[in-house]
C-alpha cells in the first residue's frame, strides 16, 4: 500500500513526529517537555511557511 | 583539570566510570526497538511516544516508497551520503532489518514522493539515535 502526499502534508507529518521525539528527549520535566515539543512544532511551521514564501518571492 | 572537564561534560550526577552493564542493556534495547530503552528504564509514557513517532515515520517512509541507503563507494559526496544514510537507516534497528527480511527493496524512482520517503526513513533512524543518546544519559545518571 503506497501513499502520495503533498509537500505540505509531508512537512506537517515530519514536523509533528519530530517535535514529539524532541520534546521527549529534550527536557527533564513533563511540563518542560510539553512546552518544548509545542515550541519545536511551532518553529517547524514558521520555517515551512517562511521558507515557502521566501522561495516564492525568490523565484519572482 | 581533566577531572573537572569530565564532570562538567557529564552534567550533574554524571558518572564517568559508569559500568557498561548499567547502560548497555537499555542502549541496545533502545536501538533494537524504538522506545524500549525507555521502557526498560521504567519510563513507559516516553517509551510509548517514541515507539509511536519513530515507527510512524518509518512506516510512512515505506509507504512513500522511500529507498534504503546502501554503502557504496563513488565520488566523495555520494560516498558520504551513502554511508551517512546507511548509518541513519541502521539506527532504526529491528524496523530496518524487518523491512529487509520481508523483502522491501526500492530502486531510485523519479518524483518527489519517493525522495520524501527516503528522508523519512533516514530521519526515523536519526530520531531513534536521539532516543538512544537519551537512554544512555538516563542510565549513567547524567540526566534525571
Image (tube, rainbow, N blue to C red):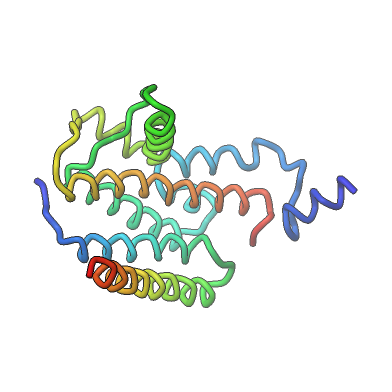
* Closer-to-camera residue (B39/B104): B104
Residue plotted at (33% across, 28% down):
B70
Give the farthest residue toward the right: B1
Residue plotted at (50% across, 53% down):
B38
Figure label count: 0
Splitting the image into 4 quarters, where does residue B143 fall? bottom right
Give the x, y percent position of residue B126.
Answer: 43, 47
Residue plotted at (9% across, 46% down):
A1
Give the x, y percent position of residue B18.
Answer: 72, 42
Position of residue A60 in the picture relative to residue B51 (left or right): left
Position of residue B97 in the picture relative to residue B79 (left or right): left
Position of residue A9 in the picture relative to residue B12 (left or right): left
Task: Locate the C terminus of chain B by quadrant.
Answer: bottom right
Give the answer, above or below, for where B54 lies relative to A27: above
Position of residue B5 in the picture relative to residue B61 (left or right): right
Splitting the image into 4 quarters, where does residue B92 fall? top left
Give the farthest residue toward the top: B73
* Closer-to-camera residue (B80/B5): B80
* Closer-to-camera residue (B108/B40): B108
Give the farthest residue toward the front: A60
Residue plotted at (65% across, 36% down):
B21
Give the x, y percent position of residue B1.
Answer: 90, 48
Give the answer, above or below, for where A43 lies relative to B5: below
* Closer-to-camera residue (B106/B74): B74
Give the x, y percent position of residue A24.
Answer: 48, 63
Amino acid at each position: 500500500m503506497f501513499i502520495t502526499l503533498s509537500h505540505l502534508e509531508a512537512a506537517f507529518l515530519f514536523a509533528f513526529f519530530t517535535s514529539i521525539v524532541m520534546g521527549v528527549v529534550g527536557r527533564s520535566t513533563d511540563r518542560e517537555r510539553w512546552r518544548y515539543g509545542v515550541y519545536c512544532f511551532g518553529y517547524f511551521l514558521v520555517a515551512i511557511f517562511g521558507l515557502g514564501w521566501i522561495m516564492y518571492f525568490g523565484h519572482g | 583539570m581533566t577531572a573537572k572537564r569530565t564532570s562538567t561534560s557529564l552534567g550533574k550526577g554524571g558518572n564517568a566510570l559508569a559500568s557498561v552493564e548499567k547502560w548497555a542493556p537499555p542502549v541496545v534495547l533502545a536501538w533494537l526497538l524504538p522506545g524500549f530503552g525507555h521502557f526498560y528504564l521504567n519510563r513507559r509514557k516516553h517509551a510509548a511516544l517514541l515507539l509511536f513517532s519513530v515507527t510512524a515515520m518509518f512506516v510512512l517512509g515505506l509507504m512513500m516508497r522511500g529507498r534504503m541507503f546502501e554503502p557504496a563507494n563513488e565520488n566523495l559526496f555520494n560516498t558520504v551520503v551513502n554511508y551517512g544514510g546507511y548509518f541513519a537507516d541502521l539506527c532504526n534497528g529491528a524496523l530496518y532489518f524487518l523491512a529487509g527480511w520481508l523483502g522491501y527493496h526500492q530502486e531510485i524512482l523519479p518524483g518527489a514522493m519517493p525522495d520524501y520517503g527516503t528522508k523519512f526513513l533516514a530521519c526515523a533512524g536519526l530520531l531513534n539515535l536521539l532516543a538512544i543518546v537519551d537512554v544512555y544519559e538516563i542510565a549513567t545518571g547524567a540526566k534525571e
